[in-house]
Amino acid sequence: QLQLVESGGDLVQPGGSLRLSCAASGFTLDYYGIGWFRQAPGKEREGVSCISKSGGITKYTDSVKGRFTISRDNAKTTVYLQMNSLKPEDTAVYYCAAVRYSCSLGPQYYDYWGQGTQVTVSS
């Protein structure tokens, strides 16, 4: 069974950092682009970042450019989202998802989803 499991969410003060991990089981990540999405209460799910299967293409939504970095380690079947200079508006449940071959910030393209990890940025 194909599964994605997110971890690393926490409560952090504004300006702090977190690293989220997305671990795959039941399949290899080699043929999948991976996206990170977030959803705050009362808001639609938003594409944050994605990385292609080779790692050669990365995309970021404008609000996180320069602060977040996505990376992948296919040998460890894990994708990371390094989040620096966190702001209260980054508070949300963060999800990772897998799409065959591609990389997109549109959630409608993704086939497999994790259960999410909570990130709260507050003083």
Image (spheres, rainbow, N blue to C red):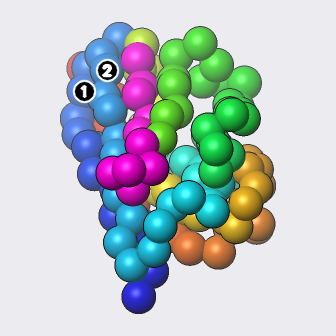
- Can residue 22 be seen at all in this image of the molecule? no
Q: Amino acid at mark 2?
A: Ser
Task: Using the image, determine if residue 56 lies above or below residue 123.
Answer: below
Q: Nearer the viewer, residue 86 or 54?
A: 54
Please identify the residue farthest to the bottom as the structure is shown.
1
Q: Nearer the viewer, residue 78 or 36?
A: 78
Crowding at label 2, few (<14), some or many (≥20) Cα neighbours within 10 Å?
A: some
Task: Using the image, determine if residue 109 lies above or below residue 40.
Answer: below
Question: What residue do we see at 73% from left, 50% from top?
Answer: 103
Residue at disc 1, secondary structure: strand
Q: Quadrant of the N terminus?
A: bottom left
Question: In this rendering, would 60 be left or right of 77?
Answer: right
Q: Position of residue 29 (x, y in %)?
A: 51, 61
Q: Position of residue 102 (x, y in %)?
A: 76, 55
Question: What residue do we see at 39% from left, 56% from top?
Answer: 77
Residue 81 counted in the magenta span: yes
> Where does label 1 land, which residue?
12
Span highlighted in magenta in the image:
73-84
Q: Position of residue 71 (x, y in %)?
A: 49, 34
Question: What residue do we see at 56% from left, 58% from top?
Answer: 30
Question: In this rendering, would 56 be left or right of 96?
Answer: right
Task: Using the image, determine if residue 85 lies above or below residue 101.
Answer: above
In the drawing, what numbered circle is on residue 42?
none
> Where does label 2 land, which residue?
17
Please identify the residue farthest to the front as the structure is shown.
75
Question: What residue do we see at 76% from left, 67% from top?
Answer: 108
Residue 74 counted in the magenta span: yes
